[in-house]
Amino acid sequence: AQSVTQLDSHVSVSEGTPVLLRCNYSSSYSPSLFWYVQHPNKGLQLLLKYTSAATLVKGINGFEAEFKKSETSFHLTKPSAHMSDAAEYFCVVSPYSGGGADGLTFGKGTHLIIQP
Amino acid sequence: EAGVAQSPRYKIIEKRQSVAFWCNPISGHATLYWYQQILGQGPKLLIQFQNNGVVDDSQLPKDRFSAERLKGVDSTLKIQPAKLEDSAVYLCASSLGTSGASTDTQYFGPGTRLTVL
């Protein structure tokens, strides 16, 4: 079984300052890990994904995440927050499965607030 | 490229009534998923199809929920009868489904917001 824990339900930062959204995962297999973003009244959008290649993954809109197996973490960062980054962010895990079942397991989400 | 389409976008029903949601995945995507997102939570997988076959329905409440993908393209999700706790956003997603190793990106539709009164 796999799971993810997002350590903060809300994160508030000032515009122009760094963003850190924390995620720990648990998986019996080598997982694929994702970050998705959900803006109000909009669909889920993939930010980035880790699939056992490079441990530092770059995504869209300046976001990146680092896979640390020893810490079972996959934290999301951005050097400088923009007002448009305000949204709900989900850390997501999908197990390797030879049978093809690869439904995503979502964390509870972190609400990112950007202060002007 | 057109995205995942869902309808209706909103639905309000009384408890014990029936409701159906429709999803049209991205053209050429073999795998289709239905997720339930309750307010304040992350989405939860209900069912996964590969073409017109069910791959995983372990979290689908089969006493009231059913889903089908008869021709391997469009899919419908039905709730009969609805309960108050079924109020949620129902999301459809699709992926190419060729890798079989969970690396395919899942693309999500806008969702159907269901309110059960």
Image (spheres, coloured by chain):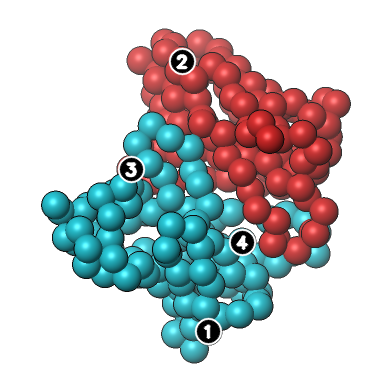
Chain colours: A cyan, B red
Q: In the rendered image, which residue does mark 3 sit on?
A: B40
Q: Please, what is the three-letter code of the amino acid marked with disc 2? A: Lys
Say what amino acid the circle numbered 4 marks. Answer: Ser
Q: Whole-percent x and y of residue B47?
A: 66, 40
Q: Nearer the viewer, mark 3 or mark 1?
A: 1
- Indicate which disc, 4 or 1, sits on the residue closer to the N terminus: 1
The residue that disc 2 covers is B11
- Distance from Cα at disc 4 to Cα at disc 1: 15 Å
Q: Which residue is mark 4?
A: A94
Q: Is residue A38 above or below residue B26?
A: below
Q: Say few, some or many: other residues with alpha carbon within 10 Å of mark 3 (under 14 / 14 to 19 / 20 or more).
A: few
Sequence-earlier tag: 3 or 2: 2
User: At label 3, which amino acid type do we have?
Assistant: Gly
Residue at (50% x, 11% y) in the render: B17
Q: State how far apart marks 4 and 3 are (Cα).
A: 21 Å
Report the amino acid beneath label 1.
Answer: Lys
**Residue B116 in sight in this render:** yes
| Chain of the residue where label 3 is placed in the rendered structure | B
Say the numbered circle drawn on residue B41. Answer: none
A89 and B81: which is toward the camera: A89
Name the residue rendered at 42%, 63% in the picture: A62
